[in-house]
Image: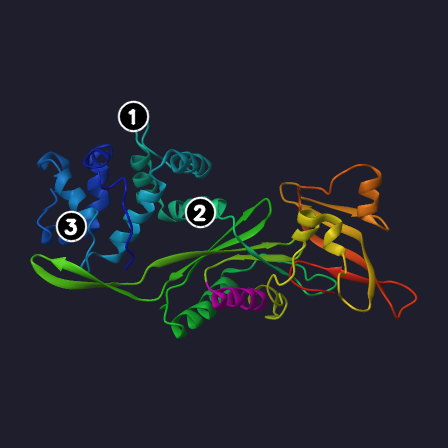
Amino acid sequence: MATFSLRRFSCPETLRAIAPERMLAFLEPYRQFFQSRGVPLPANVSDGNLDYEKLAAILITPDSKTPSELIDALYYVDEMATPEGMDSLLAEAGHRKLKLAPGPDQSPADIAVQVWLLDRDILERKHAELHIAKVRSFEYYQMDRRPRRVFRRPSNEQLNALARDLDDWFEANKRGRGTCLIMGEQDDGVWFLVRHGDPYKREESIDGEMASSVCYRLLKPDVVVYAPQIGELRINARSRGEKQLYSTRFGKHLFGDENIFPGTEKYTLDSLREMGEDSLAPGDIDGIEWIKLGEVQFFFPGNPWEVVTRKSDDSFALLKSRDKRFPEVGRMIRATFQVKFSDAKKPRSVVLKPSNIA
């Protein structure tokens, strides 16, 4: 069971903003639960008013007896009951020709409940898309194959096999089973939202006047994105084990090779921007006379996407001669350096990518 803060459901006025017949339909599958909590639901709206104050008190204090399905429903509706969430749902409802109630006097929560009742998959998917749009921190894994493997959209069978494989790891590492994969596409690649359990938690609680405890497993969303334009997997996850899990299992099930995304972002190109030419100074390294930057590739996501290559026999010298700065936009995905060793007549070429050296 997940615990969370239901900001909007804590206010009876917000509940009243949802049409009573719709609210009753939303709660109907859990009639017995509300009866056990002392709030019997009317058979229909005309039989009596809903007690919004008591409903709000129950909805914001889930306990060990609260149905997990109700918690899921409350979580998604609460998360999407915002102006941003409403806009996203209305656009998708129009695209899918979903028959929402007409009229301007509908709150974001009212729209979210309607979509949940009509097609919960839409609500879950739009929630996933909004979550992914907010994620900014990733580790990058470059495909270690030339020529690059062709990406083909995975079938449902592949996704199910991937979910089972992830489940085996999560179960073995005390996170439980029940992994859910949601796939979609954006301008910069194919994304996957991976919902899974966190390690078990046990907290003290009060049941009436008796001290008790609540045991639950938090639901955690991770994000994995594959950019076919540049053969790159990027991962947003908490632990090192989870990141390694995704890099190997996604490689296995998408490309048939669990070693196709080696290592992690052990090497970066950020110092080229931060330090400029000073980043190439060999310093006290014996055997190296000089290092020059020859080529840099910059990736600009979007639709259409773009990779821009800047090439010279000495890029920093070229910038200095033209009184220009190193480009400050675009993510650097590949750089080529010329390295002159003391015992060699000619410089050697070294290619540096975000996650591996070639």
Q: How many marks overall?
A: 3
Q: Give the residue at x 53% y 60%.
A: 155
Residue under label 1: 105
Q: Earlier in the sequence, mark 2 or mark 1?
A: 1
Q: Which residue is mark 2?
A: 131
Where is residue 8, by image quadrant? top left
In the image, taking residue 276 as reference, residue 39 lies left or right, namely left
Whether 59 is among the magenta residues is: no
Residue range in magenta is 239-252
Q: Are marks 2 and 1 in contact (CB under 8 Å)?
A: no
User: What's the residue at 39%, 48% (across, down)?
Assistant: 124
* Res 56 → quadrant: top left
Asked which secondary structure carries label 1, the reply is loop
Instruction: Say which of marks 2 and 3 sits in front.
Output: 2
Residue ID for mark 3:
31
Residue 299 as seen in the image, left or right of residue 22: right
Residue 27 in the image, given as x and y percentages of width and height: 21, 46
Mark toward the viewer: 2 or 1: 2
Amino acid type at image mark 2 = His
Q: Position of residue 90 (x, y in %)?
A: 41, 34
Closer to the camera in the image, 38 or 209? 209
